[in-house]
Image: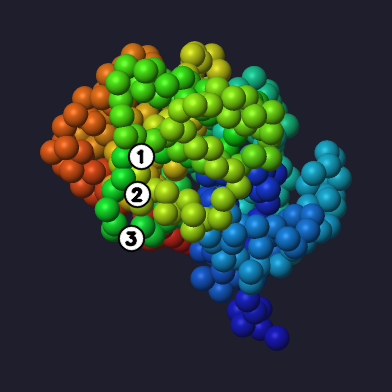
Amino acid sequence: MDRSNKRKKAAVFDHYLDTMGGGEVYTASVVRCLLQQDFAVELFWEDTGIKHNINKFLGIDIDLASINHFGYSLFTQKGHWLQKRQLTHAFDLAFFVSDGSVPVLFSKKNILHFQIPFTNVHGSSLLNHIKLSYIHHIVCNSNFTKRVIDKEYSLKSEVLYPPININPEKTKKQNIILSVGRFTDTLHNKRQDVLVSSFKNLVDEGLKDWRLVLIGSSKEGKTMIEDLKALAKGYPIEILTDVRHTTLEDAYTVAKIFWHAAGFGVDQEKHPKQVEHFGIATAEAMAAGCIPIVINKGGQPEIVEDGKNGYLWGTTDELKTKTIQLISNPREISELSDKANKSSKRFSKERFFKELSKIIG
């Protein structure tokens, strides 16, 4: 049979796929785009349940992708260059998310994606440059990530912003401040403790009839969640874990304000991994007309323009002051809500698919 009549094959691998965060929305959206382009997609993973979980928690249907157990086993081990070459050589395209290392890829078109601004990983080593010579596109999720990656690996990457993954319906807003981000006390701590303490301060200072709602995955932070519940006790604060994607969409839709504090107290020049590398939750909140008041670090300033479509803050005093000023001005809430929604469209799924399709060729 003429090869031109065969479906093209794509391999996709993301070390962090089961964390169900913003980076996994990125990877799942890549799979969805490839499926729409009639690729036969093989997802390198250990079990088929990942497809169900992606649909349940991220709202992305990738059921037509197949699971390649051998590929997962092979690429979670070091070495085995020959086997990796033989496996990837059978694919027309490979999309891999880096864990700091550079994989051995030999498909017809190889795309390496950096979600995390890795440093001090010997990125510019001779071995990495040999492996990078087989990579056709190196893609980052933000300019913040790109600046760090380009320096660490001595290369020139390109930016493909993540896609918004919600379809909010217009409804009456409620007096809710929302924060979305997985609960973890690892390097990428979202600092929900800072938000809880700040909200408690506002309530103690007279704020009434407002609630703080925290939503996120609990996989990495069981103890942290219990600590947050203890800290929030007696205040109008809700902590929701492992919610369905539809529940998350509803939360975005009714909230008026979005808070984010990942990277608080961190020197982002020394520790770029500890701040928000992009912040798709912020963009999704804005798509629902939720006004962002987010920390001025990492990729957040690429989404939010202070005073134009939301607010940026550096200290908790700034966070509280800007929040109270906004709450006290209903007209500004209405105007900024519209501006936030409009500016979020540059992170649309349609834009993502279009730009990715150009890279795929």
Residue at the outermost bottom position: 1
Mark 2: give few (<14), some (14-19) or many (20+) Cα within 10 Å. many
Q: CA distance from mark 3 to mark 2?
A: 9 Å
Q: Nearer the viewer, mark 3 or mark 2?
A: 2
Q: Tag 2's secondary structure?
A: helix
**Label of residue 176 in the image:** 1
Residue 81 place in picture, x, y as percent = 82, 45
Q: Is residue 269 left or right of residue 56?
A: left
Instruction: Pick out the residue farthest to the front.
Output: 234
Mark identifier at residue 254: 2
In front of the other: 288 or 278 = 288
In depth, the one of 346 and 92 nearer the eye is 346
Residue displayed at 23% across by 31% down: 327
Counting from the top left corner in percent of width and height, residue 125 is at 68, 26
The residue indicated by pointer 3 is 169
Query: Amino acid under label 2?
Result: Val
Mark positioned earlier in the residue sequence (3 or 2)? 3
Are dots 2 and 1 in contact, CB under 8 Å?
Answer: yes
Q: Which amino acid does the dot numbered 1 rest on?
A: Ile
Measured along the vertical axis of the image, is residue 144 above or below residue 197? below
Left or right: where 202 falls relative to 279 = left
How is colour applied across the structure in the image? rainbow
Q: Is residue 202 visible?
A: yes
The answer to which of marks 3 and 1 sits earlier in the sequence is 3
Quadrant assignment for the N terminus: bottom right
Mark 3: which secondary structure? loop
Q: Residue at x 65, y 44 (%)?
A: 19
Taking 268 as reference, is 131 above or below it? below
Q: Amino acid at mark 3?
A: Glu
